[in-house]
Amino acid sequence: MRRLPVYFLIDVSESMVGEPIQQVEDGLGQIIQALKTDPYAIETAWVSIIVFAGQAKTLVPLQEIINFYPPRFPIGGGTSLSKGLGHLMYELRKNQVKTTYEVKGDWKPIIFLFTDGVPTDDTSAAIAEWKQNWQRSANMVAVSFGDEADTNVLKELTENVVHFKNSSPAAYKQFFKWITDSIKTSSESVEKNASGFELSKIHDTDTLSKIDLSKPMPPRGSTDSNFVVMVGKCQHMQRDYLIKYRRAEQDAELYGLNLSRLYYKLVGAFQVDKNYRELSDDNVKPARINSEELIGNPTCPCCGNQWGFALCSCGQIHCIGDEKMSTCPTCGTTASYGISEGGFDVNRAQG
């Protein structure tokens, strides 16, 4: 039986922590469950999941739908699209079955790229390799989650660039149904010896819309301005966690002028496992933000300490409780902590 390989290349950078990555995890489960009931997909579709942040890895190797079990998604530091593309191309070369006199090879692979941010590395070499070796022999759909993804980069990879306005659980459900329907129609197409790649029609453009690539795209910065994410470490359990803040604006009046003040409001703190360090790029220089721009201090998601945002003199964040003396789990310094007067600069992840 000829295979229709379907790859999901998923951005798992820090800004995806919390609800977004949970929705993607749940959504992939819904896709697989639906495909297992489709007679065309179950005969032809093989699925793989690749994740990327500062590094990339294969989370699920290419396998038949019937044997596929949706994984838990890790989080990593940075958004190295070049490493994600490089790993994808490695997997495509490794898994490809070519047509010979004895064997009918694979149909053109379908790749769904999900990203919510801006690459933190130089993507030119990886994009050039993609264009030369794979752009005509694979079908890619690039999905911009939210408003911060660099669509200038995405349109170099494919003409199929769509914008997902990920605003609610209902929107996520509708989005993953569109992905499922697109895989189903493509599976049916190859079974009937047609083109093999047919995206489902987009019905609700308020949730999902195709981006007009003929219009010039505004330049993007190297840090996601919609979120601020910082890395902390639990004082007691020695585990990493991420503190996430969402962008907000507040009207203010100064010297008779109506101004809009930018700040970031706490979303929450989230545990990450050992995969966070594995998927992070340690060579990326962190950006800085002043604490006065941040509203809210979380509890520690690992041990429940009252404050999850305490800054050591070494520059690292950790949690503290009611104890008089606390020990930084990064550098081992023991000190007494208090409330700072005025703001202080702190490292932020690139999201």
Image: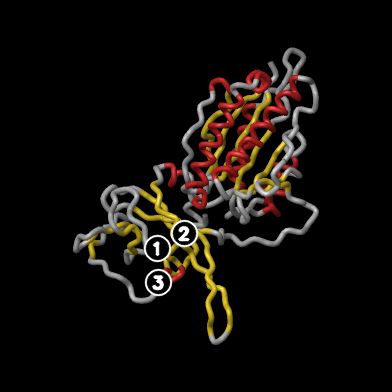
Please give the residue where the numbered disc 3 appears in the rendered image. Answer: 344
252 sits left or right of 106 in the view: left
User: Which sits in the foreground, 335 or 324?
Assistant: 324
The numbered mark at residue 296 is 1
20 sits left or right of 343 in the view: right
CA distance separating discs 3 and 1: 15 Å
Extreme-top residue of the structure = 102
241 sits left or right of 207 in the view: left
User: Which sits in the foreground, 269 or 97?
Assistant: 269
Residue located 65% across and 24% down the image = 45
Residue located 31% across and 57% down the image = 319
Answer yes or no: do the residues labelled 2 and 1 have beta carbons within 8 Å?
Answer: yes
Q: Position of residue 69 (x, y in %)?
A: 51, 27
Of the residues shown, which amino acid type is indicated by label 3? Phe
Mark 3 crowd level (few <14, some 14–19, many ≥20, 10 Å Cα): few
Choose the circle earlier in sequence order: 3 or 2: 2
Of the residues shown, which amino acid type is indicated by label 1? Gly
Answer yes or no: do the residues labelled 3 and 1 have beta carbons within 8 Å?
Answer: no
CA distance separating discs 3 and 2: 17 Å
CA distance separating discs 2 and 1: 9 Å
Mark 2 crowd level (few <14, some 14–19, many ≥20, 10 Å Cα): many
| Viewer-nearest of discs 3 and 2 | 2
Please give the residue where the numbered disc 2 appears in the rendered image. Answer: 245
User: Which sits in the foreground, 19 or 123?
Assistant: 19
Choose the circle earlier in sequence order: 2 or 1: 2
Q: Secondary structure at mark 1?
A: loop
User: Which sits in the foreground, 28 or 78?
Assistant: 28
